[in-house]
Image (cartoon, rainbow, N blue to C red):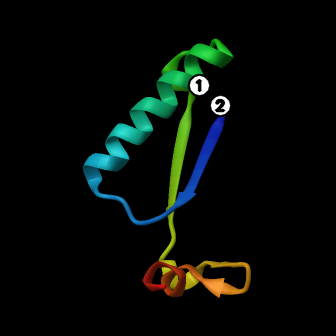
Amino acid sequence: MPVITVDGPKLSKEQKTELVKSITKAASEIIKLPEQAFIVLIQEREMDNVGVGGVLLSDKKTS
């Protein structure tokens, strides 16, 4: 079973549903396996817990 991990910002349940559906469909078509074979894991990250170029994303957003 292929496992797909999405690491990103907080999402609403509706966004998660759409994302999982879209990723699963695309992966199934490309890899030629049934959609039921895929596992999609969503890891949400707070902007205070991610730094880019030495600056927290939460600080970049307000700048």
Percent x, y of residue 15: 32, 48
Write down the residue under mark 1: 27
The x and y percentages for residue 56 are 59, 85
Q: Secondary structure at mark 2?
A: loop
Drawn side of residue 24 relative to residue 5, left or right? left
Say few, some or many: other residues with alpha carbon within 10 Å of mark 2 (under 14 / 14 to 19 / 20 or more).
Answer: few
Q: Amino acid at mark 1?
A: Ala
Q: Nearer the viewer, residue 30 or 53?
A: 53
Question: Which of pointers 2 and 1 indicates the residue nearer the eye?
Answer: 1
Disc number placed over residue 39 in the picture, else none: none
Quarter of the image where the N terminus is located: top right
Q: Position of residue 53 (x, y in %)?
A: 73, 79
Q: Residue at x 64, y 17 (%)?
A: 30
| Depicted 26 relative to depicted 39: above or below | above
Q: Is residue 7 depicted above or below 58 in this figure?
A: above
Question: Distance of mark 2 from mark 1, alpha carbons?
Answer: 12 Å
Sequence-wise first label, 2 or 1: 2
Please rate how many residues cluster around mark 1, counting C-alpha atoms within 10 Å: few if below 14, some from 14 to 19, many from 20.
some
Query: Does 13 appear above or below 32?
Result: below
| Up-down relation of residue 14 to residue 32 (above or below) | below
Dot 2 amino acid type: Met
Residue at the image position 47 percent from the left and 77 percent from the top: 46
Q: Residue at image x 49%, y 85%?
A: 63
Where does label 2 land, which residue? 1
**Residue drawn at x 53%, y 50% as measured from the top left:** 41
Disc 1 is placed on an element classified as: helix
Q: Nearer the viewer, residue 4 or 62?
A: 62
